[in-house]
Amino acid sequence: MFKDLDPILHSQLRLAVVSLLIGVREAEFTYIREKTGASSGNLSVQIQKLKDAGYIDVVKQFKDNYPQTICKITPAGVQAFEEYVKNLQTYLKT
C-alpha cells in the first residue's frame, strides 16, 4: 500500500536542493545556499551526496577570478524526484 520513499531525497535539505533545481535546471551554489538557508559546509555535504547518487552534476569553474560552483539536475534526478512525489502521494491518499 505505502511506497518506499527514496532515502536520498527524504532529507529535508537534499529535497530542497532538488526541488530548486527542478524549477531552474541549474543554479550556483550561492543561490542554493541563500534559498535554503543552509550553511556552506552542510550544503556541500548534501550536494556531494546528491552527486554521488547521480541526481545532480556539479561543475566547478572560475568567474572573474572567483570560484564558482554550478549544480545541474540530471535526468536521473528528475526521474527520482517525480517518483518520490508520486510515492509520497500514496501516504496522503490513505
Image: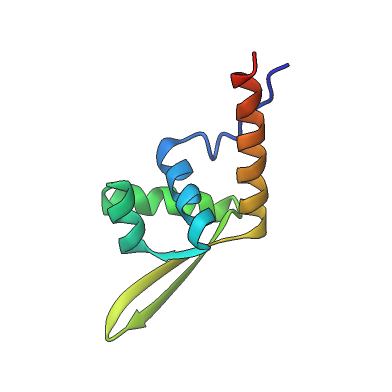
How far from the left and from the top, in percent, is residue 13?
A: 40, 42
In the displayed structure, would residue 84 be above or below residue 91?
Answer: below
Q: Hey, which residue is sitting farthest front in the picture?
A: 93
Q: Is residue 91 left or right of residue 19?
A: right
Name the residue at the right extreme: 1
Percent of width and height locating residue 27: 42, 64
Residue drawn at x 39%, y 50% is 45
Residue 53, horizontal then vertical, whole percent: 59, 50
Locate the C terminus and report the quarter of the image it occupies: top right
How many callouts does the rendering have?
Answer: 0
Residue drawn at the location 73% of the way across and 16% of the way down:
1
Query: On screen, 69 above or below 9?
Result: below
Image coordinates for residue 15, horizontal then vertical, percent: 48, 42
Which color scheme is applied?
rainbow
Q: Nearer the viewer, residue 5 or 89?
A: 89
Residue in the picture at 37% in, 54% down: 44
Q: Quadrant of residue 86?
A: top right
Question: Residue, x 67% and y 49% (percent of image)?
Answer: 79
Question: Residue 35 vs residue 80: left or right?
Answer: left
| Residue lying at the far bottom of the rendered structure | 64
